[in-house]
Amino acid sequence: MNIHEYQGKDILKRYGVRIQEGIVAESPEKAVEAAKQIMAQSGSKYVVVKSQIHAGGRGKGRIRGMEQRGVAVAKSVDEVRDIAKNLIGNVLVTHQTGPEGKKVNKVLVAQDVFYPGASEPKEMYISILLDRSKACNVIMASTEGGMDIEEVAASTPEKIVKEWIDPAVGLQPFQARKIAFGLGLEGEAFKEMVKFVTALYKAYVDTDASMFEINPVLKTSDNKILAVDAKVNLDDNALYRHPDLANLRDITEEDPLEVEASANDLNYVKLDGNVGCMVNGAGLAMATMDIIKLSGGEPANFLDVGGGANAKTVEAGFRIILKDPNVKAILINIFGGIVRCDRVATGVVEAYKAIGDIPVPIIVRLQGTNAAEGAKIIDESGLKVQSAVELKEAAEKVRNVVQEMGL
Amino acid sequence: MSVLVNKDSKVIVQGFTGSEGSFHAQQMIEYGTNVVGGVTPGKGGQTHLDRPVFNTVQQAVDEAGADVSIIFVPPAFAADAIMEAADAGIKVIICITEGIPTEDMVAVKNYIADKEVRLIGPNCPGVMTAEECKVGIMPGFIFKKGTVGIVSKSGTLTYEAVDQLTKAGLGQSTAIGIGGDPIIGTTTKEAVELLMNDPETEAIVMIGEIGGGMEAEAARWIKADGNRKPVVGFIAGQTAPKGRRMGHAGAIVGGADDTAAAKMAIMRECGIHVVESPALIGDTMLKALGK
């Protein structure tokens, strides 16, 4: 599960990780109030107004139809109001949102942390994630703050410091020191970084996170280390033991069809294509999308109905797929192992009748237990549904439909 | 021969008396698997499906001689169940449970690292040695005894492959469902290696999906090992977008290396017969075997 920057920073702060302080606001007026408070606390007349959306690249991204960037420095309360007006309620387009962008509902009004002082501020990068091949967590740090880590890894891999954490004993002090030295820090900033990394790792483990990316981590001009941004992903499988964190879900950030599907216990991901699909099992569902593409269509979605595949789940699946106006045909692909194909076929027919007239061609491929009986039920239903048994046959029928409809 | 499980395996079911455990234990017994009992803490001494229920895995090992365990317990308790089985000396642990927190699996992997145990899964359909022993949830009727081994991250896609093989006249030795989670007990390469060294297996189907580097690792091993047996490979998710989780917890494209296209390219370079369409697994295996 993704959460917003301000939510991620709240978590970090609870664990003693120093952050760029800020107050979240849902209107320009609230943003102004927040700015006054932040200015009073920091003693600076500058604040940063940051769009809160579940996508990166906000600083470089622009509000659609405006010059306004997704993150902007304000030098006065009036500027805060103007920027917040530009951001809130409008659509921010970044390299991660795609051209459709994401609507900004909230902004974070944050303290200016690049204040002048005894030393130069310095931006760095720290992330924590799972190393799948080593089956343990890894902390990655780089002196190249503000840059995309994949770019750094490709061009100057020597600038990345990595520490793998032994699950039996957790992060050790020497590892935190290696990271701080590796980032070229000394004196007070070094000590601060050791504390920062230690607290950050504790937060990661305690919250069952699947990714922390702090980019940039800032050494301020007075040698404090703080998180200026926080990208936090949490492990969906572990949310049951963190009800407080599960509440951080923001469904306005998700596709409405995906929200509806998850409410129906369906695993659905919306895509941009024209052929919808409904499948049992995640691997077969991905493979079915691939078959649609190989047959000349474009998959409109990923949809795994799981082991149940009965009239109720099939109907819920139909309704969700049909709400996508781009869908011009649907392929149902069920391999009946434990579930019997004749039951699934009856479910498809019932669901079809419950919905009424479905305006797009449907191909139902049922294979496995009682496959022939399933096909017979589909063929004799009188509905505009084509049946298939072999996967090759289903692929051919998709190809024919795609060609006939000129998709 | 075959690998991991056979007619001599003494299987226990952890989560025996639950609805999933009961249903699939019954199916396994009907297939001919030697299920010697089950474990449900607090129900020890009872009888379920005409077999003894034990309080602990240790009792099942001591009293029923269990050497294989299949786990159906809910995600919150599954890591504990795996570690209990490993501690009791079970040699092959097969965990079907989907939805185990990743941190729990990190702990499990670490716990079993220096023990003589093989973990399959979690989030997998289990292991099937055709016409001998089913330890999992795969539909038995699609299998036919033969010489093609299967390694797969996915459930229904494995059934698809098996069904195509059977219809092409190619029976199977052992099908290993390794699971779709980011951390699993047995990797693609390890499962392929088992089949490569199994005298009964003549050819291998290797089915992967987006995310992680296990298929590339397996492909490189196959090549380094001298391509001793023909391997037909498929990677699901050629059309999956970057950064979106496609059902399985581990099925997510992170960078340039874990896309379906990247994995398929490496597999081809390593001499694997890669199919773009999952509908062609059976036909391609026939060709690879020169039949």
Image (cartoon, coloured by chain):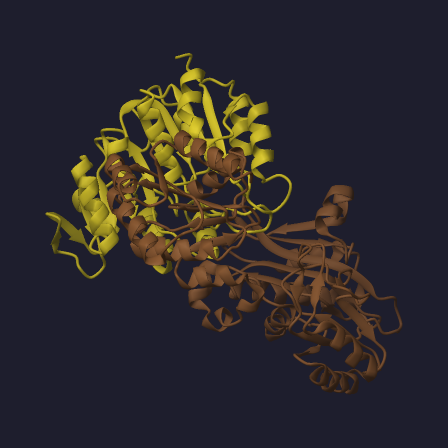
- Please name the residue shown 27% across and 36% down the image: A371
The C terminus of chain A - image quarter? top right
> Residue B256's spot in the image, x, y percent?
64, 41
Residue A62 x/y as whole percent: 76, 63
Marks counted in the figure total 0
Left or right of B126 in this view: A359 = right
Identify the colour of chain B in the image: yellow
What x and y, as percent, mark residue A270?
Answer: 53, 53
Chain drawn in brown: A
Q: In this view, does A272 lie above or below A78?
A: above
Q: Can residue A69 be seen in this view?
A: yes
Q: Nearer the viewer, residue A165 or A405?
A: A405
Q: Front-most of A380 and A52?
A: A380
Q: Which of A95/B253 is in front?
A: A95
Check the image and report above or below for A355 versus A227.
Answer: above
Q: Can residue B113 be seen in this view?
A: no
Displayed quadrant of residue B266: top right
Question: Image point 44% across, 54% down: which residue?
Answer: A267
Residue A244, above or below B118: below
In this picture, residue B233 sits left or right of residue A145: left
Drawn side of residue A275 relative to residue A107, left or right: left
